[in-house]
Image (cartoon, helix red, strand yellow):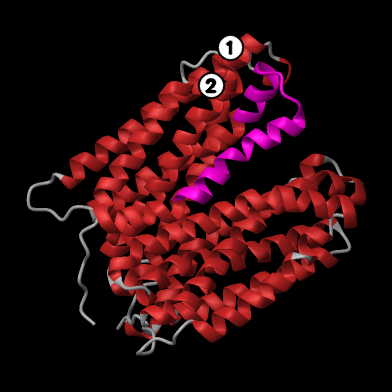
């Protein structure tokens, strides 16, 4: 597949379109959570059933994102991105109009399917629409938009639910989907040649590329770091409320520091990746996550809110640097006709990490405390927090070791080495 890159002046609307297609899925992930209590009351359903509104979305994204990435390689990435935005927008409207809980859950699954296409294609299209020298900056911008969507969702959703009801969290997003659809259709340039046809004996999911050590290590480290980031979201509320005695409002305010730091760090991290190289910034990001997690593993409750937030800022900033550099490293290394598949794999590894952080690291936190953290004493919660971040520091240290070993393989291409594929 022949790639193309617009002039510098034409990059602004292109990056605006790609930013919107990255913001929408992250907003869709976070905005519905705050409306769950209102949904439970409206449908007279227990929390276990209403939770399907969140699970259906995440499950659809996780199951379909790699397939969506490969279909984009075969059928056209621009075409599949537009289709994903259209499906997401229509499904969002259906969510807001759903008369019953099963219909709402089914519409959320459709919304997740659209999000899968958007998430896989957005990063893949960076390789086609952005000059190689500015790939890191573009990836950093996408990371910022993802963090903005994650941070904006709960606050915006809370205001909408309180003022207009749970339907508003979907009906308010649908018009933004329409704007994004128009933006992507009119600003993203068409490919210079048609996409590869499935009839050309191209397998739908050719996973032999996983033999590439650069890609394999990128996927493994992405999963490990995402596990740690989710553990901060799982452990943080319990630590802040039970160990430090903060109110629910203050807990929410403190927890918003993480996404805010990620949003502010994304673009500078991307620029640093372009300037200093992907490998150097991957190592820097991982080292920062390890340092922050190590401090959190020994920080006493007497250090107060600052003792928790400052190391958390280091962890989150390191994550933003790592994400921008790893996405750049992997996508530059990917063959042109496999960018969609590689992007799908990257997003899949991130989702696997998030689910592992919620389940495995949550189990570590509970086991190291009393087993029932909801009524645990402050000392037990602190012990669980320390154990969780010890495990987190060890996991990311393993990832850093893999990166250092892989990039020093004699005669082998290191991560960040662009692979020049034939047109």
Q: Where 223 sits versus 419, above or below?
A: above
User: Is residue 264 in the magenta section?
Assistant: yes
Q: Secondary structure at mark 2?
A: helix
Q: Residue at x 65, y 73 (%)?
A: 87
Q: Quadrant of residue 339?
A: bottom left
Please tell me which residue lies in front, 101 or 199: 101
Q: Which residues are magenta?
A: 236-265
Which residue in the rendered view is the most extreme toward the left?
A: 411
Circle 2 packing at 10 Å, graded few (<14), some (14-19), many (20+), is some
Q: Which of disc 1 and disc 2 is earlier in sequence?
A: 1
Residue at the bottom extreme, as displayed: 193
For the C terminus, the image quarter is bottom left
Q: Is residue 78 above or below residue 313?
A: below
Asked whether the residues under the numbered discs 2 and 1 touch, taking CB atoms below 8 Å apart as contact, a structural biologist would say yes
Q: Position of residue 147 (x, y in %)?
A: 55, 51
Is residue 396 in the magenta section?
no
Front one among 33 and 64 = 33
Q: Residue at x 64, y 57 (%)?
A: 27
Give the label on residue 302, or none: 1
Query: Which residue was labeled with disc 2?
Result: 307
Residue 367's label in the rendered image is none
Q: Residues within 10 Å of mark 1 (few under 14, many from 20)?
A: few
Q: In the figure, is residue 184 to the left or right of 7?
A: right
Asked if 282 appears above or below 392 in the picture, the reply is: below
Q: Residue at x 35, y 57 (%)?
A: 271
Tell me the quarter of the image containing the N terminus: bottom left
Residue 329 appears in the figure: no
**68 left or right of 160 in image:** left
* SS at circle 1: helix
């Amino acid at each position: 597949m022949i790639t193309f890159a617009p002039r510098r002046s034409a990059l602004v609307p292109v990056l605006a379109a790609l930013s919107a297609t990255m913001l929408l899925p992250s907003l869709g992930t976070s905005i519905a959570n705050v409306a769950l209590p209102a949904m439970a009351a409206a449908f007279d359903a227990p929390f276990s059933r209403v939770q399907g509104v969140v699970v259906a979305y995440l499950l659809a994204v996780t199951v379909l994102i790699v397939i969506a990435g490969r279909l984009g390689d075969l059928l056209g990435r621009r075409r599949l991105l537009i289709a994903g935005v259209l499906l997401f927008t229509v499904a969002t409207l259906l969510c807001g109009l759903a008369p019953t809980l099963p219909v709402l859950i089914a519409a959320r699954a459709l919304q997740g399917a659209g999000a899968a296409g958007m998430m896989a294609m957005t990063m893949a299209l960076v390789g086609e629409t952005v000059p190689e020298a500015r790939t890191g900056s573009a990836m950093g911008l996408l990371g910022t938009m993802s963090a903005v969507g994650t941070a904006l969702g709960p606050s915006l959703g809370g205001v909408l639910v309180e003022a207009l009801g749970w339907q508003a969290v979907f009906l308010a997003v649908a018009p933004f989907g329409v704007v994004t659809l128009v933006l992507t259709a009119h600003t993203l340039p068409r490919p210079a040649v048609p996409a590869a046809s499935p009839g050309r004996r191209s397998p739908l999911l050719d996973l032999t590329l996983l033999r590439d050590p650069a890609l394999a290590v990128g996927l493994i480290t992405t999963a490990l770091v995402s596990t740690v980031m989710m553990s901060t979201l799982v452990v943080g509320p319990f630590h802040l409320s039970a160990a430090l005695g903060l109110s629910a409002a203050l807990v929410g305010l403190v927890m918003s520091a993480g996404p805010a730091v990620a949003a502010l760090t994304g673009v500078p991290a991307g620029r640093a990746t372009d300037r200093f190289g992907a490998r150097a910034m991957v190592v820097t990001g991982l080292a920062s996550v390890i340092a922050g997690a190590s401090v959190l593993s020994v920080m006493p409750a007497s250090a107060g809110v600052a003792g928790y937030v400052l190391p958390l800022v280091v962890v989150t900033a390191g994550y933003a640097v790592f994400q921008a550099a790893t996405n750049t490293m992997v996508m530059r290394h990917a063959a042109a006709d496999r960018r969609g598949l590689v992007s799908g794999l990257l997003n899949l590894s991130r989702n696997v990490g998030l689910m592992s952080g919620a389940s495995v690291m949550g189990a570590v936190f509970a086991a190291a405390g009393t087993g029932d953290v909801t009524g645990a004493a402050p000392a037990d919660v602190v012990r669980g927090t320390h154990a969780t971040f010890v495990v987190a520091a060890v996991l990311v240290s393993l990832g850093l070791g893999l990166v250092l070993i892989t990039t020093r393989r004699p005669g082998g291409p290191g991560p960040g080495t662009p692979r020049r594929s034939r047109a």
